[in-house]
Amino acid sequence: MNDEPLWASESFWKKVAIWVTAGSFLILVVLTMDSLSQTSAGGKRVQAYSVINKKIDYQYQEKLHKSIPVVGGDELLFGQQFSEEEARQLVDLGKKTSQAKNCMNCHTLLGNGAYYAPDLTKAWLDKGWIGTDVREDLMMKFLMDPENNARTYGSNRKMPNLGITEQEAKGLIAFLKWMSSIDTNGFPYNFKTIYAEE
């Protein structure tokens, strides 16, 4: 007769390992599906692509201790109203261009990337673009010819000419505008938008 307790047997721990692994796998699947729904465009935290037709700003919420995106009235990009599909294609072009040109080699996007150059998460709203009436034009010129349209703000760091075409520049600007509408839980902190009053 074996007096070994159940919890001390090898077969018990094999079964426990199988059940824990299976349970963990199921939890991982559920969490993955939830994360995908939370991070898909058109959700609560990630706006639909057509948000590029709207004014985007941030408002500090005292109760939450963070700034949250606020989508306002119409503020057309390139003077054009984009359908959801047109907006998706333009933002997608911008995202693919940022990947092809390896923007994250110098910049940070949504907390990922390098810290040599400015964070691009809310670049659309950066005060460095002087005003909303000249922002698109300044961004286009800078992206297509950064050497002659440098915006270094005393850092002396300059973006190299990456051979960005006009269409790619429009895509990048649309991507930056869309990305600025994502609720990033307050990141980057203490960011003052182009609309903020001193």
Image: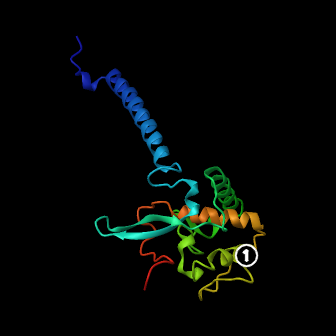
127 vs 58: above or below: below
137 vs 165: above or below: below
- Residue 140's spot in the image, x, y percent? 70, 73
- Residue 5's spot in the image, x, y percent? 22, 22
Q: Which residue is drawn at 42% across and 32% down?
A: 26
Side of 164 where 92 appears, left or right: left
- Residue 176's spot in the image, x, y percent? 59, 65
Q: Quadrant of the N terminus?
A: top left
Side of 54 where 198 appears, left or right: left
Side of 129 where 46 appears, left or right: left
Check disc 1 and report the residue beneath it.
160
Residue 103 visible here: no
Q: Which residue is drawn at 55% across and 62% down?
A: 179
Q: What element carries label 1?
A: loop
Residue 12 visible here: yes
- Considering depth in this image, is 140 or 110 the residue closer to the camera? 140
Q: In which quarter of the image is the C terminus?
A: bottom left
Graded by Cα atoms within 10 Å as few (under 14), some (14 to 19) or many (20 or more), the crowding at tag 1 reads: few
Residue type, mark 1 in image: Pro
10 vs 2: above or below: below
- Residue 72's spot in the image, x, y percent? 47, 65
Q: Quadrant of residue 50?
A: bottom right
Q: Residue at x 75, y 70 (%)?
A: 162
